[in-house]
Each structure stands twice: as structure tokens, then as C-alpha cells.
Image: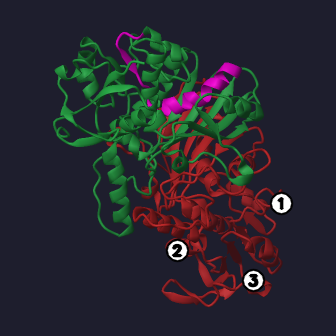
Chain colours: A green, B red
């Protein structure tokens, strides 16, 4: 089997997790490059026991790179096309190209075949969308989902390593009765919840909420599916949770949904109320699967279901999904 | 104006807040009695600058009491009827009598006239239901609400003073890398969210979720209104938040809803996205009003609205609502 020259662009929370996931999944890496801004250049990371020195990203950094995993942020708009020009396939975790009709938006469990049409860039969806769709696709296949009402409980690590630091330092300060600063979040995040993720748009929704609407349609290839979302940041380090209410065309019972989801790829059903078993952020951390529980019929409509979906936002919501896309490219001999 | 002999039964988080609210609102108290279990008897509290010694509750404790404010828990089933027998009007914060057809279930901003039919006991609704209905009633009056999908973000103080202590001690332990215990909650609550409040029922919903369904119908006097809920505990000390999606019979725009809510009693609209203004648990703490924001149209259905509703669960969700019911009794000359 061939090994590939891989570059990770970005060395924050997501970039670090990509590094870990490549190692854990024994991804066929020939040479690994770590690229970042000037600020991080010169620092070291360990991959498979070997030191790798982070380099500042330049267009020429992509010479000889087969797979460029962009961890998100501004680097994507600046360098993704440069990487493609130099022969790399880009898997991009930013939102820059997700709705571009020339760019496949892929969740391997949901729409693996979409990768086949790539023209150099493949986009990794938003973290909240990925875990929602892994859970909803098997039900959509069985009963056709018409409408989704989702409320999220999103971990601070989705806003990067500095956000993790801000939750830690604010929490410490509050417990000690000291003053604290706010840099990443517009309001105190410790012991608080903020209905505000990404910027607000003209229509009153946040960009995060609209990502869940628009990316869902593109990934499912269905412009009629209706999604309305409220995205909320909670003082959790890792693991996004979602309270999801769906309306389906055909009737599906909670038991049927549980059976279908138990057999679906990438899902672990945790749903035993008698033993207080349901998905929890603290338990999904460092796991690659999407956890589903609290599955119950919603009798306020003819065909309704409620469920609770949790996943590690840095893994399945970002790094793992990106690496799985790379694995898919290899499997489908597209690289 | 007459002054009343008042008893507060329970001296935990809610009982303490009732004491504070009676003082702040200058409630016409003649004599105040603090009643609790044996464990708390003998301790002291301050009311209007005077020491009051907590007494153990006995049936005879209610002799001469005009208004008995039960803070919740087992005392209600044990002593509420005894208090009524001895001539007191009981305002009960437990769930014991809420669905009893002989007991009015009252939110003063929503169904004040219901108190008129009381037979000695008036029930204070569940905290999550109270704040939801204060926000929804003006919209129900204007456009007739058909269906509600609600996800909650509930503070630990709703589970009592020991829960507040548990969040504090777990948080400290985790930041210091130490072991910690779980007593109040079935799983770690620090830096985590739990889709589990009160016990689980046969139908897969928690009792908390079904309270929001059944109490809403009783308070609005409308058995056709449909509510489906997911109740989630979050690591916040004070202030429940709710992501509420509604479907109305008549069309109502976000602007119209904002205007109606701004003029409604007990509500403060905080909804200016350009200045990151939306309701926050940390800002509603120690306030008696219900805060509403993130009001936006949901175009996935014909007449849909999303909103974000926050209130101090110990105040409007419990103590303030109970004291307002007592004020209503006086105002309506029912006592």
C-alpha cells in the first residue's frame, strides 16, 4: 500500500486532534508536515515518536504534499487553492468552501459518494451538523425526515484552545472571588450559557444556526428538508450535545429508531433510563462515534421523535471526520 | 391595611429566597414563622433585622397562621392539609397538588383569576413552566399557540442547596485534578450537561419534561395546546434558560412578538444582536422578571417563532411567584 505525504495546516485544538487521530488510526503517512502561522513556527510536536518542527505556511510548503488537512480558520482562504495547484487534495475544516457547488461537503457515514466529484477541495462540515446528520441519516432513510428543530449545547473547545483556557481561568477566578477577563466570548462563559455562536446574521439567526440549516440540505442532497436551530455555548470543555426533535413522513416508533440506530455506522446507542444511561459530553470525549439516547416518540405531531445526540466536537465534529474523508479517498482510489 | 401571620416551610434554597422576597417586596407580615425538619430546627435567620429561630414543623405549628408558604419537598404532603384545617391558605411549591382539579395552579401574569376558586391550597407551578408561560401567554393571546418544542438549560440550584455545593466542589476538584464525589446528581455535573431532571417515566420522558406538558395545559386552561420538552441540567448556579420553538394559528412576526412582549407584565425583552444583548442566566440572577430574546421567525412552518427565555429559577421560578400569589390573594380580598 502506498503511503502519502500529509500536511496539517493549523496547530490549535483541531490540528492537534488531527495529529492524534492520524496516529491512532494508523493512517498511511509517508512524510508529515505541520504548517501554521509565524507565531507557532519553530515549536515542536511529536508524531509516532518523532519530533516534527512546525513551519510557517507558504505557497511552496505544499510542494510534494498529497493530502492537506486544513484545521480551520483563515489559512483555508489563503492557501487551499495554492495547495490544490501544487497537486494536493485539500480536506478543509473551515466554512469557506462548504456551500461552494464545486466542493463536496462530506460526512463519510452519510454521503460518501460525494467525494467522487471533488475538484481538489473537499469540505468538512460544521461540527454540530456532522453529529446531527450521522444520527439522522439512518432515520431519514427509513422514514424521510421533513422537519428538524434542534437546540445545541456546545463545548468551548469548538471555539479553539484559547476558549478552553478562558473557561478554565474564569472558573478558577469565580470560585476564588477574583476578577477575570473576557477575550474569546462576549460574555462570561463560566457557570453561564450563551445563545450566541459565530456571528449574527440579518435574519436574526447566528451563522452557526444557519450552517446547520444549509449544510444539512447540501449533505443530504435534499432542499426540502427543513431545519430550525438554536445554537448555545455551554461551560463544557469537550463534547457537543443536541436536543433534536424531528417530524418524519412515515411513522417510526422509538423502538424502531433505536434498532435502526444501533445497526448504523459510527453510532453508539446509549439509552437505558433504568440505569441512568444516556449520552454525556464527559463520556464522549476522545471517542470517534456519535452517541444517541433519550429516544422517545413525540405525540404532539403524527410522526414525531425526540432524541439526544452527543459527540466529541474536536474528533467526529472535526478531526476524525476529516481523516475519515482522507481514508475514503484512498479506499475509492481517488488519490 | 391588615398584616398577616406568615409561615415559610422549608429553609433551603427556595425557603431562603422566599424570606428575601417577602422582605424586599415589603409584604404585609405581622408575625413570621420559619418551619423545617428537625435537622434545621434551632438555627437562626434574619428577617427585617430581627432574628427568627427555625422551629421543627408540627401540625400545631400552623395555629394562627394566615399564609403558609411551602418551599417544596415532602413537607407539603405531610402538612399542607393540616395547615388548611387550621385556617391557613397554603401556597405550595411542591409538585404534590399541581394537577389536583381542586387546586388552582397559578402564574399571576398568566391566570390570576384561577386563585378565586381555591379551597385552601394554591399550587406554584414548576420553575421551567412558569418562565415559559410568562413569555408565551402574551403570544398565545395574540396568535393562539398550537405547539411548543422546548429544550431547557436548567441551573443546579433547582435541585437545592446541596446541588449548588456539589457543582462547586466538583468544579474545584476537577480544576485541581483531584477525585470528587457525586451525591445529588447521578453523573458529574461540573463541565458536563445531563438530559435528566427528576425521575424518568414509562413513556421515556422525565417527570420534569411532563410537568411542562401537563402544567401548561392546566394553567392556560387549554387541553389542545401541545408541548414536547427536553429538560437538561447545565453547570450554572442560578437561572434556567429555554430554547422555545412555537407554532401559532395566526401569523405573528418577530417584530410584532417583540412589541407585544415588551408591553407584557413581568417581562423584559433583551434582544439587540448588534450589541450582543440577549438573556443570560448570570444576568437574571436576583431578578424577578422573565427575560426574553433571540426572537426570530421560524420559516420551516407557516407560523413559527423561536425565542430564548431566561429567569431566576429560585425567584420567578419559585419564591417570587409564590409571594406574588399571596399578594394576589390580598389584592382580590380572598384572605
In this picture, which residue range is highlighted in magenta? A118-143
Circle 2: element type: helix
Q: Distance between the residues labelled 3 and 2?
A: 21 Å
The spot of residue B17 in percent (x, y) is: 55, 71
| Camera-side residue of A207 and A160 | A160
The numbered mark at residue B56 is: none
| Camera-side residue of A148 and B118 | A148
The spot of residue B46 in percent (x, y) is: 52, 84
Quadrant in which residue A260 is drawn: top right
Q: Does the magenta stretch include residue A315?
A: no
Task: Give the mark nearest the N terminus, 3 or 2.
Answer: 2
Q: Is residue A41 in view?
A: yes
Disc 3 chain ID: B
Note whether B162 is above or below A233 in the view shown: below
Same subunit, tags 1 and 2: yes
Q: Are marks 1 and 2 in contact (CB under 8 Å)?
A: no
The spot of residue A252 in percent (x, y) is: 75, 27
The numbered mark at residue B20 is: 2
Q: Residue at x 69, y 75 (%)?
A: B67
- The residue where tag 3 is placed is B62
Amino acid at each position: 500500500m502506498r503511503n502519502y505525504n500529509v500536511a496539517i495546516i493549523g496547530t490549535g485544538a483541531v490540528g492537534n486532534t488531527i495529529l492524534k487521530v492520524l496516529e491512532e488510526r494508523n493512517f498511511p503517512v509517508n512524510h508529515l508536515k505541520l504548517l501554521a502561522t509565524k507565531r507557532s513556527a519553530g515549536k515542536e510536536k511529536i508524531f509516532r515518536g518523532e519530533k516534527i518542527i512546525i513551519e510557517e505556511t507558504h505557497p511552496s510548503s505544499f510542494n510534494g504534499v498529497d493530502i492537506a488537512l486544513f484545521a480551520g480558520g483563515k489559512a483555508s482562504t489563503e492557501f487551499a487553492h495554492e495547495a490544490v495547484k501544487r497537486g494536493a487534495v485539500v480536506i478543509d475544516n473551515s466554512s469557506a468552501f462548504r456551500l461552494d457547488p464545486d466542493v463536496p461537503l462530506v460526512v463519510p457515514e452519510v454521503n460518501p459518494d460525494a467525494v467522487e466529484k471533488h475538484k481538489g477541495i473537499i469540505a468538512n462540515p460544521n461540527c454540530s451538523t456532522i453529529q446531527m446528520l450521522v444520527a439522522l441519516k439512518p432515520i431519514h432513510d427509513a422514514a424521510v425526515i421533513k422537519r428538524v428543530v434542534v437546540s445545541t449545547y456546545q463545548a468551548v473547545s469548538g471555539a479553539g484552545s484559547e476558549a478552553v483556557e478562558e473557561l478554565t481561568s474564569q472558573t478558577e477566578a469565580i470560585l476564588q472571588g477574583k476578577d477575570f477577563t473576557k477575550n474569546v466570548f462576549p460574555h462570561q462563559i463560566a457557570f453561564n450559557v450563551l445563545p450566541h455562536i459565530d456571528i449574527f446574521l440579518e435574519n436574526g439567526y447566528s451563522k452557526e444556526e444557519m450552517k446547520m440549516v444549509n449544510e444539512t440540505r447540501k449533505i443530504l442532497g435534499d432542499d426540502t428538508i427543513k431545519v430550525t436551530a438554536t445554537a448555545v455555548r455551554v461551560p463544557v470543555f469537550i463534547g457537543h450535545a443536541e436536543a433534536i426533535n424531528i417530524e418524519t413522513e412515515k411513522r417510526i416508533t422509538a423502538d424502531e429508531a433505536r434498532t435502526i440506530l444501533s445497526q448504523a455506522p459510527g453510532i453508539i446507542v446509549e439509552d437505558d433510563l433504568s440505569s441512568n444511561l444516556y449520552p454525556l459530553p464527559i463520556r464522549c470525549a476522545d471517542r470517534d462515534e456519535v452517541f444517541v439516547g433519550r429516544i422517545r416518540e413525540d405525540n404532539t405531531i403524527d410522526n414525531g421523535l425526540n432524541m439526544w445526540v452527543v459527540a466529541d466536537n474536536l474528533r467526529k465534529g472535526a478531526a476524525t471526520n476529516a481523516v475519515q474523508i482522507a481514508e475514503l479517498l484512498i479506499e475509492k482510489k481517488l488519490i
